């Protein structure tokens, strides 16, 4: 429990006056190492610290920002809002097939059903798109690594590495999904997706 007054401790005890770095409240502690006024502030402060250290990653493809054809991949933004700007030909191809990101929704609702092979092809295209993103991340990382003097900050390099592992996981997930679709293909009630 936080103690916000000296009177909450016995009069003759040794106590330390502190300021909680999370809530800015003055408090009293019987341990000189006490930092936060309460467990609540300690937990919240550590959580905020972890989140600040992590690059903000948005789900799916929204992270990828479209670059012009022929443009070298580059990082834009700062802190938690880093993004890779690059050109992805497979994204272009997928967008032609699915301009408003409703391919799955329309297929599953029956508004625009697709054959099993069309669904598999769509997922394969998503894998290619991810693989291309992965390659762009890797190319940028290696180009910087091999340069005489690095231009990327630690956070940017960390971002590239984190993104690579995330894309890797996405690719594994889509491959599993394709495998599942193929395994269930004999089931007449199964809608492949
Ligand atoms: Zn506090």
Image (cartoon, helix red, strand yellow):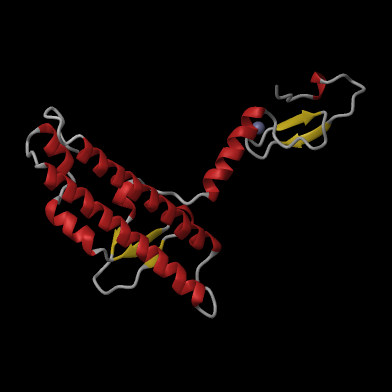
Q: Position of residue 140 (x, y in %)?
A: 42, 69
Does residue 164 appear left or right of residue 189 in this picture? right
Where the C terminus falls, by quadrant?
A: top left
150 and 187: which is toward the camera: 187
Establish if 121 lies above or below 114. below
Q: Position of residue 77 (x, y in %)?
A: 42, 60
Looking at the image, which residue is at 31% across and 56% down?
Answer: 130
Looking at the image, which residue is at 9% across and 42% down?
Answer: 115
Tell me where residue 45 sits by quadrant.
top right
Q: Position of residue 62 (x, y in %)?
A: 30, 51
Does residue 48 appear left or right of residue 35 in this picture? left
36 and 53: which is toward the camera: 53
5 and 193: which is toward the camera: 193
Establish if 58 lies above or below 132. above
Q: Residue furthest right?
A: 12
- Image region (quadrant) for ligand 1: top right
Looking at the image, which residue is at 17% across and 59% down?
Answer: 93
Where the N terminus falls, by quadrant?
A: top right
Looking at the image, which residue is at 79% across and 37% down?
Answer: 33
9 and 65: which is toward the camera: 65
């Amino acid at each position: 429990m936080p103690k916000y007054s000296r009177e909450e401790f016995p009069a003759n005890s040794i106590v330390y006056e502190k300021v909680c770095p999370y809530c800015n409240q003055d408090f009293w502690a019987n341990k000189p190492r006490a930092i936060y006024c309460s467990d609540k502030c300690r937990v919240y402060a550590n959580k905020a610290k972890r989140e600040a250290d992590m690059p903000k990653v948005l789900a799916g493809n929204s992270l990828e920002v479209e670059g012009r054809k022929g443009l070298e991949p580059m990082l834009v933004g700062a802190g938690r809002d880093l993004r890779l700007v690059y050109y992805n030909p497979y994204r272009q191809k997928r967008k032609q097939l699915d301009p408003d990101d409703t391919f799955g929704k329309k297929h599953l609702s029956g508004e625009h059903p697709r054959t099993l092979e069309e669904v598999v092809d769509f997922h394969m295209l998503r894998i290619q798109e991810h693989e291309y993103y992965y390659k762009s991340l890797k190319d940028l990382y290696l180009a910087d690594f091999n340069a005489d003097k690095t231009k990327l900050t630690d956070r940017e390099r960390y971002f590239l590495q984190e993104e690579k592992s995330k894309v890797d996981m996405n690719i594994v997930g889509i491959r599993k999904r394709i495998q599942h679709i193929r395994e269930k293909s004999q089931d007449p009630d199964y809608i492949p997706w």
